[in-house]
Every structure is written in C-alpha cells, then in structure tokens.
Amino acid sequence: MSDTKSILLVGVGGQGTILASRVLTKGLVAAGYDVKMSEIHGMSQRGGSVSTQIRFGEKVYSPIIGRGTADAIVAFEQMEALRYTDFLKTDGMMVINDYKQPSLPIMIGDAEYPDGIIDELSSKVKTVVFDAADVANNLGNLKVQNIVLLGALIKVMGLDNLDWEAIISREVPAKFKDMNIEAYHKGLELAS
Amino acid sequence: MKELLTGNEAVARGAYEYGITIAAAYPGTPSTEILENIAPYDEIYAEWSPNEKVALEVALGAAFAGARSLAAMKHVGLNVAADPMFTSAYTGVNGAFIIMTADDPGMHSSQDEQDNRYYAKFAKIPMLEPSDSQECKEFVGEAVRISEEFDTPVILRLTTRISHSKSLVELGERESVPMKSYKRNAPKYVTIPGNSKVLRVKLEDRLKKLKEYSEKSPLNRIEWGDKKIGIVTSSVSYQYAREVMGDSASYLKLGMTYPLPDELIKEFASQVEEVYVVEELEPYLEEHLKALGIKCHGKDLIPIVGELNPEIVAKGLLGKEPETIKVSIKPAARPPLMCPGCPHRGVFFVLSNKDAVVTGDIGCYTLGSQEPLSAMDTTICMGASVSNGHGFQKAFEKNGINKKVFSVIGDSTFFHSGMTGLLDIAYNKGNSTLIILDNRITAMTGQQENPGTGYTLKGEPTFQADLAKICNAMGIEKVREVNSLDLEQVEAAIDEAMNTTDPMVIIAKAPCALLKREKQPEGKSRIDVDICLQCGLCLQLGCPAIYRDENDNIIIDEYQCNGCTLCQQVCEFDAIETIM
Ligand SMILES: Cc1ncc(C[n+]2csc(CCOP(=O)(O)OP(=O)(O)O)c2C)c(N)n1
C-alpha cells in the first residue's frame, strides 16, 4: 500500500536494536497507526547480522518488505548499512552509526573490512552519519546510543510531532529516563 | 484493548482466553516463545518436556482426561512427535487438543525446510493457518471448537513470519470451562487392531463432516476485487499477495487448509479469469486445485525454495523487478559465531587437532563445524550424533579401518534423544566416545530449562538429572567429567579417549557464557603487545573478542571479552594476562 511506510533497523546480534524498535512501535501504535514488525531470532542472533523491519500506515498487510522499498534504514554498524542498502528506496534516507565491528572472516584474515563505506553510501543516498557511542558517552552512558539513533530516525521520518518523551519515559527504567530523553533530543538535533 | 503481539504471544494469549489448562512443548525456533508466554499464566500448567514426542503425548493424555490442551514445536519437532500424532487422529479426544507446528521457510534457524501442511493430509487431522497475530489468537479458539465438536486433534500451523512478526491484537477475557468428565473407554482409546479398524472407518466419516464444515466456515473467505485475477492463498502469503495486488485481484483466503473446501474453491475459480496460487514452499494448494481440474498458475511463477516476500510475489505475478541503489563495494559475510567465553569453544579447539571423525548434533555447538575450528563431520537431527558415530565406528571396525570416532552433543539434546543412542553403544559393544557439552541450559533457542538444570519452565526448583549416573546406568563405565574451560583437562580426557578401546563418555561442563545465575569467570584477558609475537594462534579459537586491528596488532576487545582465559591457555609465549 502506498501510504504505508517501511523502516529497517539493522546491526549485529547483541547490539540491542530491540529497545529502539520497541520504543518506535509503541509510539506508532499510540499515534493510531496500524503497525507490523518483524525480526529474526535464533541462529542469526549469535553475533550474526540482524534486522528488524517496521511498517506502519492506515492498514498494513505484509510484515516484511523486499528490496527497494524501505523509506529509511538505521544501521547500527557500517558494514551492515552496506549489506542492506539495496532494501532502500532510491530516494530513501539512511542513518548510519559511525562504528565498525569486524566479522569472523575479517578477524581470521579471510576477508577485509571494506574501506570507504560512508563516502560510498553518502554519494548515493541521503545519509545522516554520527558516532552514536561518542554521543552516548558524552551524555554519560554508552547504553543510550540506541535512543540517539532512534531520535535521528524519528527526525528523518518526520515523526517528531508525536509524544516520544512520554513513550520513552514508559519504556526505560525510571533512573535512566532523563538521560534517554536527552539522547532522543540529541538524535533529533543530529539529523536536523 | 489492542496490543502489538508476535504470533507466538498471540497463541499464548489464545491459550489463556480459550480455557486451555495444559500446555507442553520442547523449544525450537520459531515456536519457543509460545510456551514461554503461556508459562506466566497461573491458570495453565505448562512444561518443557524432554522432547516433542513426550510433549505431544502429555498434551494428548490431558485431552483424554478431559482438559483443553496444547502441544507446541518447530516443524522438525513434529517428525519426532509424528508417531503419537498419527494415532491420535484415530482415537480423537475428549477435551480439545491442539498441535502447534511452526515451520521455518528460508531456514533462518533450521536444518531443513519441510512443509508441515502435508502432515495434516497425511495424518488426516484438520489444519488451520493464521495470517497475522489477531488470527493466531482467534484460531486457537476455532481449533478448540473444532476439536471438541468433531472429536479430533487440530493442527495449527504457523511459519517463522507469523510466529515472529508483531501485529495488533484485540485482547479478550478468559473463558473458564469446566473439565469434561473422563470414563474408561477402551474401544476409543486403546488402539489394538480390532479397535483401530473401527476407528479407521470413523476417521473417514469425520473427515467428510470436516470437509462440509470447511465449505461454510468463515475461516475460508472470498474477498472480491478485480475478477481478472483470482488468487488462492493462505498464511503469510495472503499478506504478501494483498500487499502486491491490492484490489486489482480477488482473493480466496484459506484459514482452514485441511480439509480444503472444494466447492468454494471451484466457485471462486469459475468467477475469475485466471487463477494464481500464492503459497510458500511446496505446491500443497496448487496440487489440490489441479486435482480438482482447475487450471492455475503456481510454482511456475512462485519459487518452491525459500521464504517469500512481497518482492518475490511481485516478480512472480507481475514480472516486476524493484529499483535499487547500486553500490560499488561489498560487505564481508557475517556468519553467526560462538559467543566470547562460550564453553564449547575449547573442546572443538582440542578436537580440531585430532585425527578423528566427529559426528555432531544440533545446538550452539554446531558452530564448531565453522571456520576456524572446523571440527565436525556431520549434523543431521537432534540425537543423531550418538547413533551416527556408532555407525561410523562399526563401519570402520568391520572394514579394518583404524580411526577414532567422537560424537558431540549438548545437554538438552542428550536428554531429548541422545540417550537411546548411548544405550545402543553400550548394548551393541561400540567403542566410540560421546562428549556431552553440559553448559547447564538449552542455549541455542534462548536459554530454556531442561531436566539437567534444576528448574522447571515456570522457574520452580526441581530434581536435577545426573548425566554421569545416567551414562553409568546405561552401561558406560568410563565416564570422565572435565571443566570445559580448562584445556589441559579437556585435552587429557580426549587423549585418553583416543587411546581406549572401550566406549567412553566425557562430560565437559561449564555454564553458557550468557547464563547469569551461574558463576562466571571474572576479569578480562589482555594481550601484552610487547610480548606478543603476532603468531595468531589465539585467533584460531574463533573468539569474537580477539582480532587484528588496523595496524595488524592482535588485540582483545575488552568490552566483549568474558574472561574465559582460553586464549591465555593456548598462547605459547605467555603474552596474555587477566586484568580485573
Ligand atoms: C527435533 C528438534 N527440536 C528442536 C530443535 C531446535 N533446537 C535446536 S538446538 C536445540 C537445543 C540445543 O540445546 P543443547 O543441546 O543444550 O545445546 P546448546 O545450544 O546449549 O549448546 C534446540 C531446541 C531442533 N533442531 N530439532
């Protein structure tokens, strides 16, 4: 359906894309959208490449998308951004965490971590790139990097009119509430 | 109230709302979270059974007793449970009995891609296939009704995308139903041939009635759109077809896919110009339409292999290829790995240096087959390591080949179906060595309890099965217990096995690195760059925390390291130390 929007969150198993997608879907449901979300569990989680797909609109049918149809991709890791680029619409947006995690073939010397990913992607699509770990550390806790990335996604998707502060407050432990809200605003700013 | 639930969570909610009181399962992706989400309901007794056959038999026994029950498993689990399932079609039930199977098209985490819809037809058991989470919940209710009205087990088939996708579900109240009374009824429940011959005839009769039900059931419905194209579909394929074709086609959406509603299918086909069958995996529906004499497209356009998605359906139906962004650089592969600190790693590291055949099994440790450890010869199905190894050993022995055989199995898999193989080794005088990787949990599927962990699914403390005693009782005298994280101990036991002509078991024990309740190693390993000669031996462990940085120095990522010290133990230059 043409009014349905699709978002992909990609990263490496264990990077914690889960909280970000939970906050996002809760917010979209609260805003009255029909929402579907799909993620892959199991073998692929043991440090493998992971992806979560989120779709929302008036009425959503398929829980997953094919190539060339994502409105936005948030990549928690550079090489994963590259892996999923062909899922993006040609006029889609990419939020990329400036972070590299070598995979096993790279670690044992069978492959190399590709050079120049950010430059290549930025020359082909609209990108927002920052080091989320850095931003999060400056806010006081590495763990809030998800929410920084989420904030940037919300901005590029034009969803910042929804009450994300309320949703974040409900989804994170009370003592980290303020830091997460700050992280969200930082993300918005970085994508502005 | 509406909530965003996965298909598995919705089935669990359905079990609660439709009065189920007994649920049993063995974990298996993508079905595992069904029981995990049933467990918190006090109204339902829920257990992890040692395997799927046991789970199905427990649920069937409860249904005979008069309770509403459910057994859940992944697609290959139903192979294990097939024996009682087939006969349950003969006996029928008393209280409702639902068999949940979750197939894995695309093999996201499975060893095969079998299409369990054929089981329904094969075993003559009605089957329902939900297409989203709301239907997952409602179809549990439908299955309960059909089961009790027609006196039959009912199969509820999910797939990975149904199980693991979230969509909105309207929550309802629990229907409290008193348990049905039970009376001994041997002609119904005792399947000696004399009784089964009668039940066999009844079964055919029941199927006729179920077919009539399928014809008028709202589970099977037509959605009219443009009549040039008529799409027959079910499960998540319905969503893909709707996504791609919208109102430019008409749909026959089948929620009950066994028995199929022949008259409804014929009527639909007669009103559209061309019929397309959109289904994942095998041509199950297509074959049926063709047998009815309906001309249709199906697997000529939609692949038989792998998981579908809207792109594949669009290509099949419309010949449409998506426009994508082309980049000139390629990512390296990112295969799954054993976690940093995984206690399986050291055992495979030692095995990788031995001249031996290693028959493997299914669990996290199957990753021992991957580079750089590459220490596994076979993996077939749960439990097969033990009996495959026995077969290898007997074949070598009979043909005068002198080669040692090891079988490697996890604790949960040993309880599941490895024990019978071990009994075979003892009974038939084999001399292979079984290594039980006892990481104190069922790790692969996300940390489920098993008979060796000391806890039940509901988190209650319980008896702990003693692996060594079990092996002794089965007739294996040489049983060695070692700490998996102590390479010297592991090496010594494996060397003993290399040199023995007796059957032997090595229990390699250390908790899964992700298991929080057990004591885990403390500190982190750090490489002293001044001592390190960059020989790369530690890299051969395949630990995600150890890698070469941009300057070609080997370093340990402190954030990922779990302090297992295996890298320190393999380093020949004492270049790695623990820091606190
Ligand atoms: C018949 C069957 N049931 C379930 C599964 C799913 N499954 C694969 S491995 C595994 C558990 C492995 O646990 P364990 O043997 O303890 O090894 P670990 O993963 O902890 O290393 C399960 C449940 C399967 N592949 N086949």
Image (tube, coloured by chain):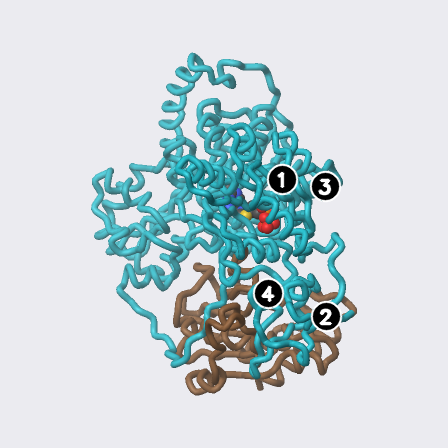
Chain colours: A brown, B cyan
Label 4–label 2 contact, CB within 8 A: no
Image point (65%, 73%), residue name: B557
How many numbered marks does the figure carry? Answer: 4
Query: Mark 4 highlights which residue?
Result: B543
Query: Mark 3 highlights which residue?
Result: B454
For residue A143, what is the image quadrant? bottom right
Q: Nearer the viewer, residue B331 or A140?
A: B331
How far is the residue under mark 4 from the one under mark 3?
30 Å
Determine whether the residue tagged by mark 2 lies in a helix, strand or loop: strand
Query: Mark 2 highlights which residue?
Result: B577
Q: Which mark is residue B48?
A: 1
Residue B138: tell me if it is visible.
Answer: no
How far is the residue under mark 3 from the one under mark 2?
35 Å
Percent position of residue B175, x then y: 62, 37
Given the image, what chain letter belongs to the residue carrying mark 4?
A: B
How far is the residue under mark 4 from the one under mark 2?
16 Å
Callout 1: CB less than 8 Å from ligand 1: no
Q: Nearer the viewer, mark 4 or mark 2?
A: 2
Q: Which mark is residue A173?
A: none
Percent position of residue B41, x then y: 68, 42
Image point (74%, 57%), residue name: B520
| Residue B561 left/right relative to B202 | right
Labels 1 and 2: the sequence-earlier one: 1
Label 2 amino acid?
Answer: Glu
Labels 3 and 2: the sequence-earlier one: 3
